Image (tube, helix red, strand yellow):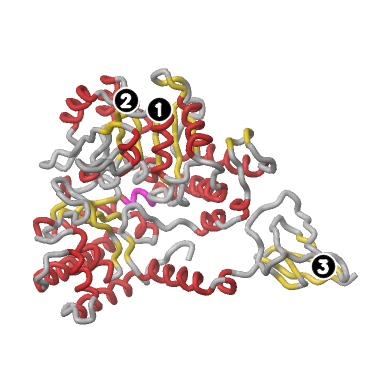
Amino acid sequence: MEATVITAYGAPLSRHQDGPLKLSSPVLCLYQSCRTRLPVSCSIASSQLSVTPENRTMPFEDSRLKELDPEMYAIIEHEKRRQAEGLELIASENFTSAAVMEAVGSCLTNKYSEGLPGKRYYGGNVYIDQSERLCQKRALEAFHLDPEVWGVNVQPLSGSPANFAVYTALLQPHDRIMGLDLPHGGHLSHGFMTPKRRVSATSVYFESMPYRLDEETGYVDYTTLERTASLFRPKLLIAGASAYPRDFEYPRMRKIADSVGAFLMMDMAHISGLVAARVVDDPFAFCDVVTTTTHKSLRGPRGGMIFFKKGMVLGVDLETAINNAVFPGLQGGPHNHTIGGLAVCLKQAATQEFKIYQQQVVANCQALAKRLLGLGYTLVSGGSDNHLVLVDLRPLGIDGARVEKVLDLASITLNKNSVPGDKSAVVPGGIRVGTPALTTRGFKEGDFVTVANFINDGVQIAIEAKGLLESPKVKDYLDYVESPAFPLKERLEHLKEEVQQFASTFPIPGI
C-alpha cells in the first residue's frame, strides 16, 4: 500500500491508504475528521498509537486559545509584550524556561492524585508517582542533601501554604513563634500583626513576637533577638525574609533556638536559587526545616517545597507530621503539572550553567548597589549579599508608592517596600530592586549600571511631580501623573521609549 508521511513537532506520522493513522514516536497527536490538531505535550508508554477514527467525535471543538477566546489571547499577548519591552526588577519574580512552561501546560494537569506517591486515594497514578518521585529526588540533589538525612514534600501550592503546613505540623494553636518583622524585611506568613489587627493567619492561630533589624546598621539585631527569645520562649524561630539584602547568621540563630528549645526553620523563598548554587550561606547545615517557593531565584513554576530532617526532632517525627499537614491537613490533590515543571526546573538547577547564572545575579546586584550609592541613594545595610537592594527614599523627600507608579509608567517594574522606621505599609519609604529576572535575560554588570541610571531618571521625575502638586494625598498624585495634563508627561514618555528600546535588545525565555 502507498504510504503518506506527515510530521507533527518533528515526529513522523505514517498512514497507509484506507488504514488508521499511526504515531511512530512517543508523542500524542490528536487527529479528528482527517484534520491535524496540535499534539498534547505528554509522553506515552507505547511508541505506536492508533488515532481516533473519523466517526468518533468529542462534544466540543478542541480549539486553540486564539480561536476559542480571542479576548484572553489578546490579554496574554499584551502581557508578553510588556515583559519583553520592560525592565522586570521585582525581586520575587523571574522568567522561567520554555521547558518548564511546556511541562506546566501538559496533560499532567488532568490528573487528580490525593496522597503521596504509592499511597494515592485514586487510581491511574503510575506516571504521576514517577513524576513526583523524580521531582523529590532532583530537589535533594539540587540542594546537595543526603536522602538518608533529609526528605522533601513538593506538593505545597506556594510559599505561604508551605509555611502554614510547617506551623500546623510542629505547633499547637497559640504556640509561640518569632519571625522577622514585616516592616524590617520579613514576610506576612511569619506572623505579622499590627496593634489593631492580626494581619496574617499565622498571627491569628499562633502567638507572634517579631524580631527586627538594628536601624543603624540595617542588619538583624541578634543581640536583641537573643534577649527577647529568652523571655518569650518561642517554640519556632523563623529565619528568612522578603526584603533583606544580607545573609542570615545561621549558627547564631541555631544557638538561640537551642537555648529556648525551639525548632529552627528557614524560609529561603527568595534565595533558594542562590542556595542551590552555593553562592550564599547554607541554611541546611543548621535548620530543622527549610521551606521555599519555586518561582523566584530558582526559576521554576509557581509552587512550594518543604525540606525536613528525617527522624525525631524535639520529640516530633518531622517527616510524618509535615506530610500529614500538607495532605490531608491543609490541601487536597497536588497540582501535578506544577510538580512536573518543578522537576524540570530542578534538573536545570543542578547544572554548572545555573551556578554561573546565580553568580551573575549577585554580581549584577552589587553593580546595581554600587551605582545607586554613587548616585547618592541610601541603601538599607549599605549594600547587598544576595539578589536585591532595598533603597531608602526618605532622605530624598519621596516615598516608594509615588516612585513605583512613575517607574511603572516608564516600563520599569519594581515594588514599593517598607524600610526600618516606616510608619505606614501603604506609603512606605523605600523600593525593593531585584536582579534575577533581568539576569535571566542576559544582563551583565554594565547593563545594571544603565538600569540604575534609568531608575534615577524616574525618581527625579517623581520628585519634581510631587513638588508640582498641591495635594499631599498619594491617590491624587497617582491620578496626576497619569493625567493627559501632567506637565512632565513628555519627559516620562521619553524615558519609557529609552527603556523599551534598551530592554527589547535582550532575549527572553519561553516567549
Disc 2: CA contacts within 10 A as few (<14), some (14-19) or many (>=20):
some
Say which residue appears at 39% left-offset and 38% top-offset.
163
The residue tagged 1 is 170
> Is residue 92 on the magenta stretch?
no
Q: What amino acid is labelled 1 in the image? A: Leu
Check disc 2 and report its element: helix, strand or loop.
Answer: loop
Disc 1: CA contacts within 10 A as few (<14), some (14-19) or many (>=20):
some
Image quadrant assignment for residue 69: bottom right
Specify which label sits upstream in the sequence, 2 or 3. Answer: 3
Above or below 57: residue 393: above
Q: What amino acid is labelled 3 in the image? A: Asn
Specify which label sits upstream in the sequence, 2 or 1. Answer: 1
How far apart are labels 2 and 1 at the CA level? 9 Å
How far apart are labels 2 and 3 at the CA level? 65 Å
Q: Is the Cβ of the residue at disc 2 closer than 8 Å to that at disc 1?
A: yes
Q: What amino acid is labelled 2 in the image? A: Lys
**Residue 218 location in percent, x, y?**
16, 43
Is residue 486 visible to the viewer in this orientation of the structure?
yes
How far apart are labels 1 and 3 at the CA level? 57 Å
Q: Is the Cβ of the residue at disc 1 closer than 8 Å to that at disc 3?
A: no
Q: Main secondary structure of the magenta part?
A: helix
Say which residue appears at 57% left-offset and 69% top-offset.
65
The residue tagged 2 is 235
The residue tagged 3 is 55
The residue segment tinted magenta is 357-361
**Residue 79 location in percent, x, y?**
42, 68
Q: Which mark is residue 414?
A: none
